[in-house]
Image: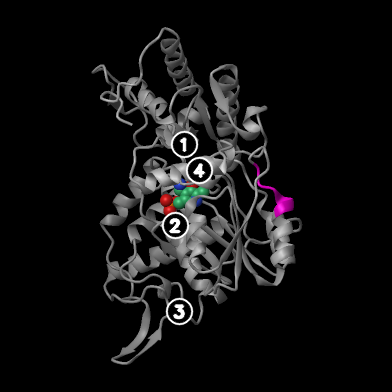
């Protein structure tokens, strides 16, 4: 079976972790939206490369030339993987999606007269960087927590000539909802704007084609992180048209970014080198290349089928537990167009307590809180402005405050139905113990 085969390809599956009671149990990772574990093949490739690597740039030694060749080959691999024309685009290696979006902010050279339209459902990384350089306008979500495309179009029409970019996530890290990126791209282009897709949650779950084809519109910019797609931390990518990275000064300068330097002048290198100051994360790029090759080998159909099975199963199980509160479209059924990210709350329990019990008593890693998407959480939880203001005031006064939030389960392609069954058992036991009058508010034990 697919899942048995794929589990053998992932490092750390089945690792035993300690529980509160001193026993050890096989760890279940339901926190893949934060970071996925790495493919074994990524590890092998990195190990192989470590024997041969050296710094890139202009080293004349064999190893330096080899490293440069490999590093540049991964750029091409990335372009192919996301369906971007390698001759027309630049593939820039950075630390992560956040750095990639900040890089684009700098490269677009915006002013406060420019408008960037983003959405209420974004990760803070696709929200805060824009605020520093442009006027930011937010497209709303509807009562199901889905992006309101009509509102997005309305805002494009309202700010029309000032809109430089529509910056939208491909999939939400809170609800997993997929956004119709090509439809949004068509709208953006109709209003002479460009589009950035924050692909952090999209890339590990769906094939992406930046080039236009007969029925899809092209995507101008794409950002994503290797650590969410079965490669280790520390490598992210920005892909975008070469014109965007030509000409202007780099946001960071230093070694690697120049052709010539005198004491009072500089000739900048071309991109992508100009955008990658200092020694880059060559090993990280090699790891990303290996994970891309592995995903291409697995094939998307099998991967999506496995994740869909898990998503549908978990949602149905959660919907049967009266005490579980689901939000948006998930409260009403099993929505389409969603990747395997499901957030919920347990009646009368703080989200961090639930996450903590699942970790310490059941060996299950989930995430709780706001997932760096506070405005979206506020909408999903239907918080009144007054409540949000009170919460902020308390934080400013450094007072203890229970943060609003959710418990998030996010799947990788290697998770199983059996793992979900342990999660449901864990949730059921929390509910049962509460019914029997257990006191969970022992903060000594559960310091959340
Ligand atoms: N955008 C989305 C949708 C994300 O889920 C994340 C990571 N949680 C980011 C951006 C930021 O990614 P990174 O931390 O790798 O920069």
SS under mark 4: helix
Viewer can see residue 54: yes
Between 90 and 277, the one lying in front of the other is 277
SS under mark 2: helix
In the picture shown, does residue 161 fall above or below 4? below
- Quarter holding the C terminus? top left
- Is 109 included in the stretch rendered in magenta? no
Q: Residues within 10 Å of mark 3 (few under 14, many from 20)?
A: some
How is the protein colored in the picture? one colour
Determine whether label 4 and label 3 are within 8 Å by CB.
no
Determine whether label 4 and label 1 are within 8 Å by CB.
no
Please report whichever mark, 4 or 3, sits nearer to the chain's N-terminal start.
3
Image spot of residue 282 (x, y percent): 34, 61
Residue position marked by numbered label 3 in the rendering: 270
- Is 150 included in the stretch rendered in magenta? yes
Image spot of residue 368 (x, y percent): 43, 34
Between 420 and 68, the one lying in front of the other is 420
Residue position marked by numbered label 1 in the rendering: 404
In the picture shown, does residue 212 fall above or below 407? below
Q: CA distance from mark 1 to mark 3?
A: 46 Å
In the picture shown, does residue 22 fall above or below 389? above
Residue position marked by numbered label 2 in the rendering: 98
Task: Locate residue 404 relative to residue 259 in the image: left or right.
Answer: right
Q: Residues within 10 Å of mark 4 (few under 14, many from 20)?
A: some
Task: Locate residue 397 relative to residue 30 in the image: left or right.
Answer: left
Taking the spot 45% from the left edge, 79% from the top edge, the residue there is 270
**Closer to the observer: label 1 or label 3?**
1
Q: CA distance from mark 2 to mark 4?
A: 25 Å
Residue that sits furthest to the top in the current view? 436
Any mark on residue 62, and which?
Answer: none
Determine whether label 2 and label 1 are within 8 Å by CB.
no
């Amino acid at each position: 079976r697919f899942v048995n085969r794929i589990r053998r390809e992932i490092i750390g599956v089945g690792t035993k972790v300690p529980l509160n009671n001193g026993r050890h149990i096989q760890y279940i990772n339901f926190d893949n939206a934060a970071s996925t574990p790495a493919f074994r093949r990524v590890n092998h490739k990195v190990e192989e490369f470590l024997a041969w690597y050296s710094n890139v740039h202009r080293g004349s030694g064999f190893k330096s030339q080899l490293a440069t060749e490999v590093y540049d080959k991964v750029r091409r691999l990335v372009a192919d993987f996301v369906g971007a024309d390698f001759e027309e685009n630049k593939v820039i290696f950075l630390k992560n999606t956040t750095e990639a979006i900040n890089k684009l902010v700098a490269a677009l050279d915006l002013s406060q007269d420019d408008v960037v339209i983003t959405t209420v459902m974004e990760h803070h990384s696709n929200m805060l960087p824009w605020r520093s350089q442009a006027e930011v306008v937010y497209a709303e979500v509807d009562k199901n927590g889905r992006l309101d495309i009509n509102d997005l179009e309305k805002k494009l029409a309202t700010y029309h000539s000032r809109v430089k970019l529509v910056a939208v996530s491909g999939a939400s890290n809170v609800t997993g909802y997929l956004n119709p990126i090509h439809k949004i791209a068509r709208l953006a282009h109709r209003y002479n704007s460009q589009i950035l897709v924050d692909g952090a949650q999209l890339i590990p779950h769906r094939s992406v084609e930046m080039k236009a084809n007969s029925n899809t519109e092209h995507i101008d910019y794409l950002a994503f992180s290797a650590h969410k797609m079965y490669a280790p931390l520390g490598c992210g990518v920005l892909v975008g048209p070469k014109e965007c990275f030509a000409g202007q000064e780099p946001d960071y300068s230093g070694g690697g970014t120049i052709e010539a330097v005198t004491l009072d002048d500089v000739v900048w290198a071309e991109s992508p080198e100009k955008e990658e100051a200092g020694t880059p994360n060559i090993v990280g790029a090699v790891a990303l290349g290996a994970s891309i090759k592995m995903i291409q080998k697995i094939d998307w159909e099998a991967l999506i089928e496995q994740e869909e099975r898990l998503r549908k199963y978990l949602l149905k199980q959660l919907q049967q537990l009266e005490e579980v509160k689901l939000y948006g479209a998930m409260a009403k059924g099993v929505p389409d167009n969603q990747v395997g990210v499901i957030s919920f709350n347990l009646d009368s329990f703080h989200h961090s307590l639930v996450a903590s019990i699942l970790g310490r008593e059941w060996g299950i890693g989930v995430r709780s809180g706001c997932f760096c998407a506070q405005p979206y959480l506020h909408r999903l939880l239907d918080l009144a402005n007054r409540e949000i203001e009170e919460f902020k005031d308390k934080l400013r006064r450094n007072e203890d405050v229970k943060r609003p939030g959710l418990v998030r389960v996010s799947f990788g392609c290697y998770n199983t139905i059996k793992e979900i069954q342990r999660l449901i058992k864990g949730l059921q036991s929390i509910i049962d113990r509460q019914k029997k009058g257990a006191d969970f508010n022992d903060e000594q034990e559960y310091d959340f």
